[in-house]
Image (spheres, helix red, strand yellow):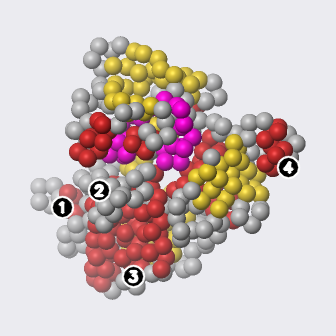
């Protein structure tokens, strides 16, 4: 199979060799797809394949998967970080202190990065995986202004990344903040690699993680038949298959349409009674008229079965609690999620019961700002309960879960960062 991102801006081509139903190979495919790297996926199922493709005699003696870079370098069973390093994407921070640190390179974080860098703030953008966030996994975004034919989430994110880099943003990929402390009008963040990031202001745009099914053997099939997200990197592998999608939102709807190009049949499992309650009308119409997509309402996946990979799911009907076992090798889960805010638990940042960051006027109770608020003025619209710490996009309490609103909040947050830095002197 050839995966061609179609991006003329990134001419690199990579070869990825591996066995079917390999979790490690899936992670690499997903990362390359989301970072808009053109690559060929070559399945190895026999010693003959191994000899023909890699000039090695036996599969049992090869540490798979193997990544072959454009210059011929071969990486055996590499980590994502090793691949990124060889592609030149892992960098060290240039400064000991920044005007602004942004955590999360989804639409909100990328938008904030573009505006902050273009306006001269010394800014660092920190992302623990690939740019694009949850939106980056979408096969097609059609309701974002300016793209009448739609654009994939990965391509949109890559364009934003290029734009931010052009303005001088410092992007640190595969880095993650573990714990933050606010003192001396600074945010001090302990990074997972043991380093520390210091900034005068910060924007949290860490988004949300897909909610899990919470089934007993879920981890057994994760990335070997069970996938969280829209499955853009897996779609070309679904030829002749019957695949299932859990979820009824726009991301699930777009996934169904994209997978229907490759799979023989796509079944959407919806908890509710209708698509219209959670899906944009244009997607409802397309799914309804797509002959190889079926929708089962009031349904839930209640069991998973297989050996080294997923072979079967159990589906329970909410109406009569009847169950049926259905053979499938691919299940895609797009059912909303929980915010990435664990880092804030030991700070004065207020979160709601679900973990979302509370900002602006939502912090007020009975007309009073929270006791931990330290300034004479009221918090700005996107400011958390810690002055100088802002939130944008899906991670924020009461946010609108759309790409356009996340982009708008990212840009707006930078405006408030300017105001905060000015008053701090």
What is the magenta range?
A: 231-254
Q: As drawn, is 96 to the left or to the right of 203?
A: right
Task: Kindly report the distance in space between the C-alpha atoms of the residues bearing marks 4 and 2.
Answer: 47 Å
Residue hosting label 4 = 55
Question: Which mark, residue 143?
Answer: 2
Q: As drawn, is 91 to the left or to the right of 409?
A: right
Residue hosting label 1 = 361
Depth check, mark 3 against mark 4: the one in front is 4
Q: As drawn, is 207 to the left or to the right of 402?
A: right
Question: Which mark, residue 118?
Answer: 3
Residue drawn 37% across and 19% down? Answer: 316
Element type where label 2 sits in the image: loop
Residue 396 is situated, as x and y percent measured from the top left of the image, at 30, 56
Depth check, mark 3 against mark 1: the one in front is 3
Task: Kindly report the distance in space between the C-alpha atoms of the residues bearing marks 3 and 2.
Answer: 26 Å
- Above or below — where is 337 with respect to 408? above
Element type where label 1 sits in the image: helix
- Above or below — where is 314 with respect to 61? above
Residue drawn 26% across and 47% down? Answer: 282
* Label 1: few (<14), some (14–19) or many (≥20) C-alpha neighbours in 10 Å: some
Depth check, mark 3 against mark 2: the one in front is 2
Residue 41 in view, yes or no: yes
């Amino acid at each position: 199979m050839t995966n061609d991102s179609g991006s003329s801006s990134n001419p690199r081509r990579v070869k990825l060799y591996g066995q079917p139903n390999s979790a490690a190979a899936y992670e690499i495919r997903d990362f390359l797809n989301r970072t808009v790297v053109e690559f060929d996926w070559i399945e190895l199922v026999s010693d003959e394949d191994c000899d023909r493709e890699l000039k090695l005699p036996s599969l049992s003696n090869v540490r798979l998967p193997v990544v072959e870079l454009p210059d011929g370098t071969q990486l055996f069973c590499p980590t994502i970080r090793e691949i990124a390093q060889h592609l030149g994407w892992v960098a060290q921070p240039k400064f000991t202190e920044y005007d602004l640190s942004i955590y999360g390179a989804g639409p909100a974080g990328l938008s904030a990065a573009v505006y902050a860098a273009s306006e001269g703030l010394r800014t660092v953008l920190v992302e623990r995986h690939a740019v694009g966030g949850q939106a980056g996994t979408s096969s097609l975004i059609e309701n974002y202004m300016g793209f009448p034919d739609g654009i994939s989430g990965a391509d949109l994110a890559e364009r934003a990344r290029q734009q931010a880099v052009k303005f001088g943003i410092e992007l640190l990929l595969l880095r993650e903040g573990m714990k933050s402390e606010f003192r001396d009008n600074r945010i001090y963040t302990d990074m997972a690699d043991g380093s520390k990031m210091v900034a005068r202001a910060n924007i949290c745009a860490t988004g949300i993680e897909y909610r899990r099914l919470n089934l007993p053997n879920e981890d057994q099939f994760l990335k070997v038949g069970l996938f969280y997200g829209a499955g853009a990197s897996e779609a070309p592998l679904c030829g002749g298959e019957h695949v299932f999608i859990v979820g009824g939102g726009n991301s699930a709807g777009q996934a169904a349409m994209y997978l229907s190009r490759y799979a023989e049949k796509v079944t959407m499992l919806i908890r509710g009674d209708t698509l219209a309650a959670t899906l944009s009308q244009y997607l409802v119409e397309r799914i309804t008229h797509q002959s190889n997509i079926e929708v089962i309402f009031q349904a839930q996946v209640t069991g998973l079965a297989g050996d080294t990979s997923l072979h079967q799911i159990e589906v329970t009907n909410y109406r009569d609690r009847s169950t049926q076992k259905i053979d499938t090798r691919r299940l895609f889960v797009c059912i909303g999620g929980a915010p990435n805010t664990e880092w804030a638990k030991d700070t004065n940042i207020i979160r709601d019961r679900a973990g979302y960051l509370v900002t602006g006027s939502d912090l007020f109770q009975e007309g009073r700002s929270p006791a931990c608020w330290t300034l004479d003025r009221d918090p700005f619209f996107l400011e958390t309960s810690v002055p100088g710490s802002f939130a944008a996009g899906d991670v924020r309490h009461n946010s609108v879960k759309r790409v356009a609103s996340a982009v708008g909040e990212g840009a707006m947050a930078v405006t408030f960062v300017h105001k905060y830095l000015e008053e701090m002197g």
